[in-house]
Image (cartoon, grey):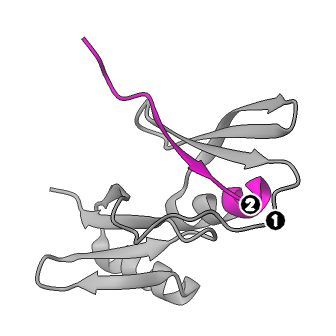
Amino acid sequence: MFRFAHENYNVLSIEKSKIFYEKALGLKEGRRINGDGFTLVFLRDSETDYELELTEVHGRTEPYDIGEAEFHLAFTTPNIAEAHKKHSEMGVIVYENPAMGIYFIADPDGYWLEIVPAK
């Protein structure tokens, strides 16, 4: 059998991304790997084993081509109104679908993250 372990996003700045993910979504660094020419940081929430792996290739300055934001991670929240207010104040909302009760935010590298009310 298989179970999800992690998703990877390549980022230009681990530190900038860590600040965003902690402020916007409450994710915290669980572990870090410093390799030859790269750094990996694994972010976690406080309730699951799933990790978001951020990879910084040292010396890279060009933004990554992430296509047309057709892929994304989704996060649930028990208070969608409070989350929306927070993300609106941060200026990170990039798309809203009021009919579905969802919206998307973007991280510093342009990756989209869906915010969904908990069931």
List x then y, in percent, for residue 94. Answer: 42, 83
Mark whose residue sits in front, 2 or 1: 1
Q: Are marks 2 and 1 in contact (CB under 8 Å)?
A: yes
Q: Nearer the viewer, residue 50 or 66?
A: 66
Q: Which residue is drawn at 29% across and 84% down?
A: 96
The quadrant of the image that shows the N terminus is top left
Q: In this view, does 12 lie above or below 108?
A: above
Tag shown at residue 117: none
Tag shown at residue 61: 1
Residue 50 lies in what quarter of the image? top left
Q: Is residue 106 above or below residue 29?
A: below
Q: Is mark 2 on a helix, strand or loop?
A: loop
Residue position marked by numbered label 2 in the rendering: 12
List x then y, in percent, for residue 78. Answer: 28, 61
Q: Which residue is drawn at 53% across and 88% down?
A: 89
Kind of residue at disc 1: Thr
Kind of residue at disc 2: Leu
Q: Which residue is drawn at 81% across and 65% down?
A: 61
Q: How far apart are marks 2 and 1 (CA)?
A: 7 Å
- Please tell me whether residue 2 belongs to the stretch shown in magenta: yes
Q: Residue furthest left?
A: 99
The quadrant of the image that shows the C terminus is bottom left
Taking the image as shown, residue 22 lies to the left or right of residue 95, namely right
What are the residue bounds of the magenta stretch? Answer: 1-18
Q: Earlier in the sequence, mark 2 or mark 1?
A: 2
Q: In this view, does 64 lie above or below 29?
A: below
